[in-house]
Image (spheres, rainbow, N blue to C red):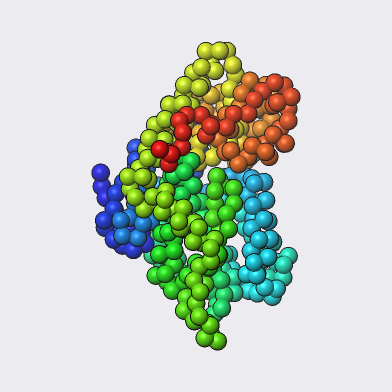
Amino acid sequence: MTEPQSCRFCRGTAGEIVLDLGDQPAADYFPPVEEPGPDPAYPLQMWLCATCGLAQLLVDPTAPEEPRGAEPAALVEQAEDAVDRVATAGWLPTGARTAEYGSPHGGSWLALLAARGLAPVADGELADVVLDCFGLMHSADQAAALPERAARVAQGGVLLLQYHSLATIMRFGQWNSLRHGHYAYYSTTALGGMLAEVGFVPRQAWRFELYGGTILLAATRGGADDEGAVDTGPDASVGDLLAEEAALGVEDPARVRALQDSAVSRAEALHLWLVEQKAAGSTVLGYGAASRAVALLCRAGVDRSLLGAVADASRAKHGRRMPATDIPVVAPGELVAAHPDAVALFLPDLMREIRRTLPEVEAAGGQWVDVESLGSKPAAEG
């Protein structure tokens, strides 16, 4: 296997491949349903740097497609909760200037911040609050992306970073979080070291249930402030995270490599469940044509004979098909009209929202099935 020339952040060359999903189609490339394929596939591997501890995408020869996803209610609700909690902690003073680095998949906080009296600045200008909400991981050059954000923080300001934690990925065996276009998978441990390199110190952390466990980290410049106050360092919320990650082994390639076992067991479990449902004469459709579903369906060897269609709220995906399969992506109304016996939900965060918006499924006797509940125990368990 080809190792990277250097780490995307520290440029170190020592490290190990901890997850290898073989050749996979680009997770954001949804071909028209009439195009038979085969679709191009590319190596998909996670590499763990032995120097700085950053888990990262090994190589990415894909070209990003225009995002076609619909913003889920869970993401909107989490943003509202986060703004409330950060404001309560005193990090969002009225009248502060703000700059946002957002995710191409949505989730902007700017309207929420404006409602609290914060004003956005123009691109490149300094801000009192610089926010990155799932955006940093989309930068191939991590060594350039983090310093850029840090440099925009005005004196006395705060850098807010939200990320899907590597600890969560390990704890729940979320191997299919790995995808092309997502270049970094942060532990709080690694991110703290990265921040130190740009002169910042994590001060406070908040946890959210989104994606099984996301972290919002507040960081400021280290050292004494303008009035000579002593730097007290991170608070207990950060210390607790670091202790949990040390116990989990986020910097131990052998522990992170347990994701490989989860990839095998979860894919096998999905295939077996679909085969059993077909043998029983049950109609099964899917919901959530998301990136996490792409690698899972491909590794599980699922085609239209086992899963008739995947419904999704994004109109841009309708009339297309799941990458590297013949499974069409359809509108939610088509799923309801089919009266499925079971619906495989590929995005567990949508469970509450989708049961509320599509009550007809259960009213007709159908069952929502969280595909992440299928298979063996999480990878991080002994």
Report the residue at 42% width, 59% height from top.
189
| Quadrant of image for the N terminus | top left
Q: Nearer the viewer, residue 21 or 242?
A: 242
Please tell me whether residue 178 is drawn above or below residue 365 in the rendered image: below
Q: Exactly how many numbered labels are in the figure?
A: 0
For this orientation, the residue located farthest to the top is: 280
Report the quarter where the C terminus lies: top left
Front one among 252 and 230: 230
> Residue 5, can we see it?
no
Quick check: 294 left or right of 208?
A: left
Q: Residue at x 74, y 24 (%)?
A: 363
Q: Quadrant of residue 355?
A: top right
User: Residue 254: horizontal and vertical position, in percent?
Assistant: 32, 45
Q: Residue at x 57, y 38 (%)?
A: 347
Relative image position of residue 28 (x, y in whole percent): 49, 43
Expressed as whole percent of the image width and height from the top left, the position of residue 88 reads 68, 65
Q: Residue 87: x and y, percent?
A: 67, 66
Q: Nearer the viewer, residue 159 or 144?
A: 159
Give me the residue at 40% from left, 64% from top: 193
Q: Is residue 365 visible?
A: yes
